[in-house]
Image (cartoon, rainbow, N blue to C red):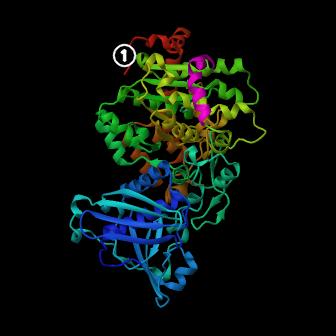
């Protein structure tokens, strides 16, 4: 039983934060899973929570993830909310989710509930801070698994933010009044239904070689351990979202086990690069990462890194969605002044697409290379390669990676079935290899310590979960990742642009007239049915594709804000916003076409020649 003696509002706040992280990462129920809590008297502030059932000591990756979830929750500075409600009503709404293992005495008829939105709920009487940020830093210091009790004790140190070192100064959450007993919904207080349940696919150590087990991992559970159906599905080959709401990126972050990019990351990047962050970062197009902090720390200490990105050449012309990661990569290369490697996975496209020949895939790789080079990468620091070409150099490393990944892991991560060709399950090692410097002896010699940052669309994450899992076992650093959202198709948020559907995308080959026609005809509008209604209600910006494209493409913050405000207020009509987009987009595409026309076969050959780096010091 917890005792009130040594309680400190920040330690109680930390308990809620840590509990939520454990529930999400270890896939345990919220209900009755807190076995005990403990506090140390005095400074430094120190606490512990014991949870269960937990069948084994978490692996390093889980531990890292739990700490990261805790950090993110503190950084997000979200409110801790408190309300009182009749016990009966609480139980009908939340089941037992708010109870610890030791429960609340029968005699209590009204509960004081403390919750962090979509994270944790608990019935107790102890004061907590108003918001999570007050905790400053929570460092998990000890993990103790008890295999007899199937429980895990997690100890942490807490370093409050400067202003709150004195307990008296901590602003405490006050009880909210509920209007006619309207308690927050269950979905509001618990982690998203299928989030806790899908944990376990983060990094391949989790898919432990047992196919039944990986099936289980794909089964979704609510936070109390009950399976739930449905949800979104994002793999490198298909993106399936909820029909109405589109992709829930916050949920995806938790499902995949990656972390949100915060304002702190952005200002840190600005400090380190001494320039304003790219609008893709400022406006949240790149929104998620793995180990970005670690990479920035190392960079700050003067340690080198290189960038790696790629493209699967499955179509002749690229569309806007394809250009996004490359534009951003170009900015990263210039801002950090680092080498870059670009992989063209012609082999992948051959294996995964029905009707392409090997020759055709290779031809498309060269065609696409011209579009990519048109973006203007630094020739002295950039190497672009086709897998079919470069495989001989990569092969020793590919083999080492293949030997470290079992068939069942590959199946578990990528969802291959018995009837998929065997090339598919071997291919991920080829996409993993460029994340290690040994893939580029001409550039990096035999240095193993150079770090790698991989800008990518979030659907590529499974490849790099696998990569990160094998990295330490081959003596390499895990690559850091930075993920973008999908650029929506013209038809709306539910889908990403598809190269195969002409009407869903703006292609780099489109003429000014085609751009105008496509946007006018297809771009999904958040405007209202009639002008009168629109003037009165204004547009729904969150579904308006033209406005979203503008947020990604228009550099001028003030102009963008003005358009957004006017459109949302009904002062601007959809047609006018579409015209603004046309005006922004036509010159961008035109400039791209002009740049591409200047790229010669000789340029491509030269960018693809690794020998030009020999004897030059790149890093
Ligand atoms: N598989 C990716 C695609 O189909 C191409 C790719 C290879 C890639 N390596 C990458 C993308 C690294 C991002 C980062 O488009």
Q: Position of residue 259 (x, y in %)?
A: 46, 48
Query: Splitting the image into 4 quarters, where does residue 124 fall?
Result: bottom left
**Residue with the most extreme right position:** 419
Residue nearer the viewer, 79 or 6: 6
Up the image or down, 158 lies above or below 557; here it is below
Camera-nearest residue between 23 and 50? 50
| Residue at image point 49% right, 21% down | 440
Q: Position of residue 190 (x, y in %)?
A: 52, 66
Q: Quadrant of residue 345?
A: top right
Residue underneath mark 1: 617
**Would residue 507 be seen by someone viewing this image from the given angle?**
no
Q: Secondary structure at mark 1?
A: loop
Most foreground residue, 574 or 340: 340
Magenta stretch: includes residue 403? yes
Name the main secondary structure of what is drawn in magenta: helix
Query: x, y (%) of residue 395?
Result: 59, 22
Q: Is residue 3 above or below residue 579?
A: below
> Which region is colored magenta?
388-404
Task: Give left or right: position of 449 versus 605.
Answer: left
């Amino acid at each position: 039983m917890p005792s009130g003696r040594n309680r400190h509002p920040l330690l109680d706040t930390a308990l809620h934060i840590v509990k939520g992280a454990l529930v999400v990462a270890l896939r345990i129920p919220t209900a009755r899973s807190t076995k005990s809590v403990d506090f140390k008297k005095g400074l430094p502030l120190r606490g512990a929570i014991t949870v269960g059932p937990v069948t084994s000591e978490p692996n390093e990756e889980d531990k890292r993830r739990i700490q990261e979830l805790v950090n993110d929750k503190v950084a997000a500075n979200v409110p801790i909310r408190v309300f009182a409600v009749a016990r009966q009503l609480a139980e009908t709404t939340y089941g037992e989710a708010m109870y610890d293992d030791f429960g609340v005495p029968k005699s209590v008829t009204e509960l004081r509930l403390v919750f962090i939105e979509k994270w944790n709920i608990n019935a107790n009487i102890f004061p907590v801070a108003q918001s999570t940020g007050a905790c400053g830093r929570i460092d998990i210091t000890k993990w103790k698994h008890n295999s007899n009790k199937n429980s895990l004790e997690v100890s942490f140190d807490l370093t409050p933010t400067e202003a709150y070192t004195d307990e008296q100064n901590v602003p405490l959450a006050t009880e909210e009044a509920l209007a006619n007993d309207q308690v927050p919904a269950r979905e509001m207080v618990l982690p998203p239904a299928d989030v806790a349940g899908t944990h376990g696919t983060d990094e391949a150590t989790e898919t432990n070689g047992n196919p039944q087990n990986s099936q289980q991992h794909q089964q979704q559970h609510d936070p109390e351990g009950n399976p739930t159906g449905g949800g979104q599905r994002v793999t490198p080959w298909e993106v399936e979202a909820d029909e109405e709401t589109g992709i829930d990126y916050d949920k995806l972050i938790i499902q995949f086990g990656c972390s949100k990019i915060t304002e702190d990351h952005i200002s840190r990047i600005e400090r380190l690069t001494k320039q304003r962050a790219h609008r893709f970062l400022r406006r949240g197009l790149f929104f998620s990462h793995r180990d970005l902090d670690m990479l920035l720390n190392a960079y700050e200490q003067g340690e080198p890194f290189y960038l790696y990105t790629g493209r699967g050449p499955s179509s002749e012309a690229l569309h806007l969605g394809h250009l996004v990661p490359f534009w951003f990569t170009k900015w990263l290369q210039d801002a950090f002044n680092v080498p870059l490697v670009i992989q063209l996975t012609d082999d992948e496209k051959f294996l995964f697409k029905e009707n392409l020949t090997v020759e055709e895939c290779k031809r498309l790789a060269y065609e696409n290379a011209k579009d990519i080079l048109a973006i203007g990468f630094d020739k002295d620091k950039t190497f672009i390669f086709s897998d079919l070409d470069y495989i001989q150099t990569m092969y020793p490393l590919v083999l080492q990676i293949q030997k470290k990944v079992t068939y069942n892991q590959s199946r578990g991560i990528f969802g291959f079935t018995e009837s998929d060709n065997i090339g598919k399950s071997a291919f991920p090692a080829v996409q993993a290899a460029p994340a290690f410097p040994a893939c580029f002896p001409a550039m990096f010699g035999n240095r193993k310590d150079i770090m790698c940052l991989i800008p990518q669309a979030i659907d590529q994450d499974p490849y790099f979960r696998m990569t990160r899992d094998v990295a330490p076992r081959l003596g390499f650093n895990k690559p850091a990742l930075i993920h973008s959202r999908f650029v929506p198709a013209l038809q709306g948020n539910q889908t990403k642009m598809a190269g195969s559907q002409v009407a869903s995308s703006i292609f780099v080959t489109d003429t000014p007239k085609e751009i105008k026609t496509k946007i006018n005809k297809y771009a999904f509008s958040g405007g209202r049915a009639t002008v009168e209604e629109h003037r009165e209600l204004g547009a729904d910006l969150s579904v308006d594709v033209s406005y979203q494209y503008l947020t990604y493409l228009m550099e001028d913050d003030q102009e963008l804000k003005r358009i957004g405000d006017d459109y949302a207020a009904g002062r601007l009509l959809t047609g006018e916003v579409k015209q603004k987009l046309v005006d922004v987009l036509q010159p961008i595409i035109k400039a791209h076409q002009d740049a591409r026309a200047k790229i010669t076969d000789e340029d491509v050959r030269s960018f693809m020649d690794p020998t030009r780096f020999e004897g030059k010091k790149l890093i």
